[in-house]
Amino acid sequence: MRSLFPGSPLVSHPARLSICALTLKAVTGLVARARRSPSARPWQRAATVHVQVLLVVRWLRWRIDLLTLARDAGISIATAYRYLHEGLEAIADQAPELNEVLQRAHRSGEVFVCLDGTLVPTDRVAARTPRGNDAWYSGKHRHHGGNLQVITDSRGFPIWISPVSPGATHDLAAARTHALGALYPHAALRPGRLAVLADAGYRGAGIGIHTPFHRPAGNQDLDPDNRAHNQLITALRAPAERAHALLTERWAALRHVSLDPWRITTIAAAVLVLITLDRGHR
């Protein structure tokens, strides 16, 4: 094996991180470029790029306390926080735009994608809505957190994640803000369209967004066609449930965020990039 950069050692710990060595190499290149920027003060570095990459990836993978990571890296806690945020930004900058993702899905022959929302738990936040309600408290989940809209391919891999919205935001409202405008041209009823499947929370989202039918008033049974429609959507969307596991079970940083909740946007984008890289290298 060769060093990633002249005169530098290889990145260690790929087994403990459960990440492909090629993914670590790609991430190291991203962070190294960010460190060479004049605004990043490349002449004032307390640790190597490899130490920084391990700090960032260990935090994302296992959510290890920054005090422990700083001690392991031999740097101060302030430098550890700076390295963490700098590394997250360098990785997250590679996350694709939604239009790019949809065009790629068309080219690869995808027939549909799935849209779903997930809540990333956070500490209690004092921010209020204009009506005086707790902006980051989700009544649906009964927890403080940030709302992320996730688009997955037909096999359940996340291919795009929205910027975070406060937890009180309904999934449909968050989707209208971040996703539906780009989805409509691809999901419209035309040859070669890319259908979008979603759960009942997205009813009324608009053309091309397919959701289950309501049960008729009076608790009557659905007619056979509508029942078959619901069963088909449920079956096709089933693999999309793996996206939640890929995001939160594998990457512990998204299980609970104690940083500024707006940082969830950067954390989720960095995780998406790592999932995409790891998938391509396996």
Image (cartoon, rainbow, N blue to C red):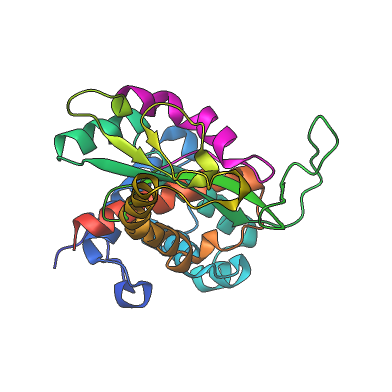
Q: Residue at x 39, y 26 (%)?
A: 207
Q: Would residue 171 appear left or right of 43 to someone viewing this image?
A: right
Q: In this picture, is 100 found above or below 116?
A: above
Q: Residue at x 54, y 67 (%)?
A: 63
Q: Position of residue 235 (x, y in %)?
A: 32, 57
Between residue 25 and residue 3, name the one nearer to us.
Answer: 25
Q: Would residue 99 appear left or right of 211 to someone viewing this image?
A: left
Q: Position of residue 171 (x, y in %)?
A: 56, 41
Q: In this picture, is 249 found above or below 268?
A: below
- The quadrant in which residue 245 appears is bottom left
Q: Position of residue 252 (x, y in %)?
A: 50, 66
Quick one: which residue is furthest to the bottom in this view?
A: 16
Q: Residue at x 44, y 45 (%)?
A: 212
Q: Quadrant of the N terminus?
A: bottom left
Q: Is residue 7 visible?
A: no
Q: Residue at x 45, y 27 (%)?
A: 206
Quick one: which residue is furthest to the right in this view?
A: 132
Q: Is residue 12 visible?
A: yes
Between residue 14 and residue 230, name the one nearer to us.
Answer: 230
Q: In this picture, is 221 found above or below 89?
A: below
Q: Position of residue 37 (x, y in %)?
A: 40, 36
Q: In this picture, is 158 found above or below 39?
A: below
Q: Which residues are magenta?
A: 161-185
Q: Quadrant of the C terminus?
A: bottom left
Between residue 51 and residue 25, name the one nearer to us.
Answer: 25
Q: Would residue 13 appear left or right of 222 to someone viewing this image?
A: left
Can residue 97 be found in the magenta stretch?
no
Can residue 184 be found in the magenta stretch?
yes
Between residue 225 and residue 123, name the one nearer to us.
Answer: 225
